Image (cartoon, rainbow, N blue to C red):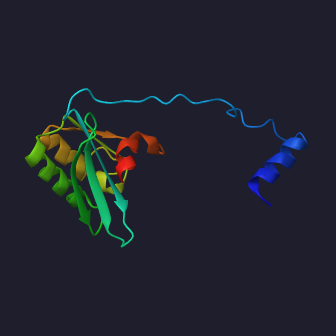
Amino acid sequence: MSESTIKRIVKGHGLSNGNKMEGIKLKWVRFERHYPNDMWQIDGTELSNAKQLVIVEDDCSRYCLGAMIFDSLTTANMIEILEKCIAMHGKPREILTDNGHEFGGTWKDSQFDEWCNKQGIIHIRAGIHKATTLGKIGAIQ
């Protein structure tokens, strides 16, 4: 039995008040930094050959600053690609990441955070279960 059939039966017998959010359009809050190098976004995705593609993108210009393929997503690999991007494009004020282990998860004193602090870069983490925060970079993956 499909999910929609179950919902229809439950609602039809008055066993549910329905979804309170049904019919309500959510308003997306868009953000964009005003200047290049204000904020970079970095994220990785698995390729069909089990390799990991990592992309760094400037939030203002949407310019792809760098892309590399790694065997795995590690903090050392993230730092490697960021150092190459910094050498080519200068240093960002902020870096936006997800909460992946390569970025220290939700720990504030991770190896990645220490590297950012030494560089004078503010590390911003996307909200937990907020995949749309990194949507710009996700669009080019």
Instruction: Identify which residue is drawn at 20% across, 59% down.
Output: 76
Q: Is residue 57 left or right of residue 86?
A: right
Q: Is residue 83 left or right of residue 22?
A: left
Instruction: Identify which residue is drawn at 30% across, 51% down.
Output: 103
From this view, report whether residue 54 is shown above or below residue 138: below
- Looking at the rendered image, the quarter that the N terminus falls into is bottom right
Residue 75 in the image: state x and y as whole percent. Answer: 24, 57
Residue 4 in the image: state x and y as whole percent. Answer: 77, 51
Residue 79 in the image: state x and y as whole percent. Answer: 19, 54
Give the residue at the far left of this rendering.
Answer: 87
Residue 20 shows in this picture:
yes
Residue 127 shows in this picture:
no
- Looking at the rendered image, the quarter that the C terminus falls into is bottom left
Instruction: Identify which residue is drawn at 45% across, 45% down.
Output: 131
Give the residue at the far right of this rendering.
Answer: 13
Q: Nearer the viewer, residue 93 or 25?
A: 25
Q: How many marks?
A: 0
Residue 46 in the image: state x and y as whole percent. Answer: 37, 64
Q: Quadrant of residue 71?
A: bottom left
